[in-house]
Image: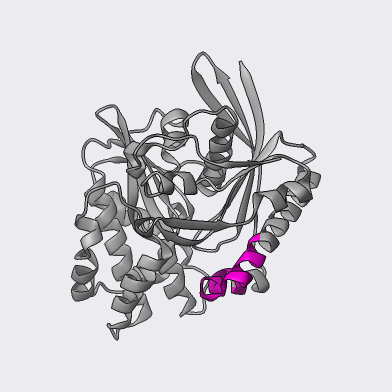
Amino acid sequence: MEDYLVIGLMSGTSLDGLDIALCSFHYQDNEWSFEILDTETRKYTDYWLKKLTSIHEAKAEELSELHFEYGHFLGEQVNSFIKKAAQKPDFIASHGHTIFHRPEKKHTLQIGDGNAIAAVTGLPVVFDFRSKDVALGGQGAPLAPIGDRLLFPGYDSCINLGGIANISFESNHQRIAFDICPVNQVLNSLSNEMGKAFDNKGEMASQGNIDFDLLIALNEFNYYKSKPPKSLGKEWVDENIFPLLDLFSIPIKDKLRTFTEHIAAQITNTIDKRHGKVLITGGGAYNDFLIERITANTSCQIEIPNNELIEFKEAMVFAFLGVLRIRNEINCLSSVTGASCDSCSGTLAT
């Protein structure tokens, strides 16, 4: 019997904020269980939104400076969270914030230096979870599938609807996972044009009309026809989705409606009969209209869990990846990423 108390940190491409989750993990009789003990999402200030949105255009020195500055920021947020929670974890596992993800060019970068986090908090930190897999020829993503396999064995597949939707499932005794399509990264951007941070429950999309020419064009991207392993990044969305949306002079609500239908189509194309019971988490699980469109187009059993798991599953899973790293056990699956071998990924700062 072994127990771990860990803080997981996650910052996604949709820039909703920094997710912090204090989690306990229990290992007994070759089975893992978990409990999410305390959570918080810290919204980014205008300063950090501007920095994280524009840093990919920065020079190397500025990028290096932000890597350390953001690490100190993460450490300060953790200290504040620990003071409120009144529980000190064994260590911290931090995903960081993705600035570049170009596995085809053999590089990926999540800023938020773990050494800076460790210096501020005085706690060990596991960070940089993606680089080793990319160095081994993998996509460096998705990383959640090992958590899906070990922590959610009762589901045929697990889908996270974040900035980008991803899925994982078992097939022929292997875990298969990949990014399906963009979700909140696009929906939030379109909502911003309407003066809203996001489309609450999908209400604006539900009031729009489908532009079938746009829908056909969206569904025709080669990415959707390619086989896994595969992953999507902000760069792909910026280079492909937004230019296409800009070509159509239609109301924003129609773009929201059409893109919602596109998401639903890509997801339902992916969850065939093999995926009978489907767990959906991530911010997109609150988009009632999107869930309605997914449910209407599949015979799968769609399950939406409690709010805590919807919002903090990713942060919890990264905490678990940190546990596996501390134990020197596999936490990154080559069947998922396409790497030359499974690996125990993550850098440890003490």
Relative side of 155 to 130, left or right? left
Relative side of 230 to 22, left or right? left
Overall secondary structure of the magenta stretch? helix
Extreme residue toward the top, this view: 29
Percent position (x, y) of residue 2?
62, 19
Relative side of 151 to 278, left or right? right
Range drawn in magenta:
50-67
Percent position (x, y) of residue 51?
61, 72
**244 inside magenta stretch:** no
Extreme residue toward the bottom, this view: 249
**53 inside magenta stretch:** yes
Q: Is residue 168 visible?
A: no
Quarter containing the C terminus = top right
Q: Between 116 and 84, which is closer to the camera in this rendering?
A: 116
Residue drawn at point x = 52 percent, y = 24 percent: 32
Relative side of 133 to 254, left or right? right
Q: Is residue 119 visible?
A: yes
Residue drawn at point x = 52 percent, y = 75 percent: 57
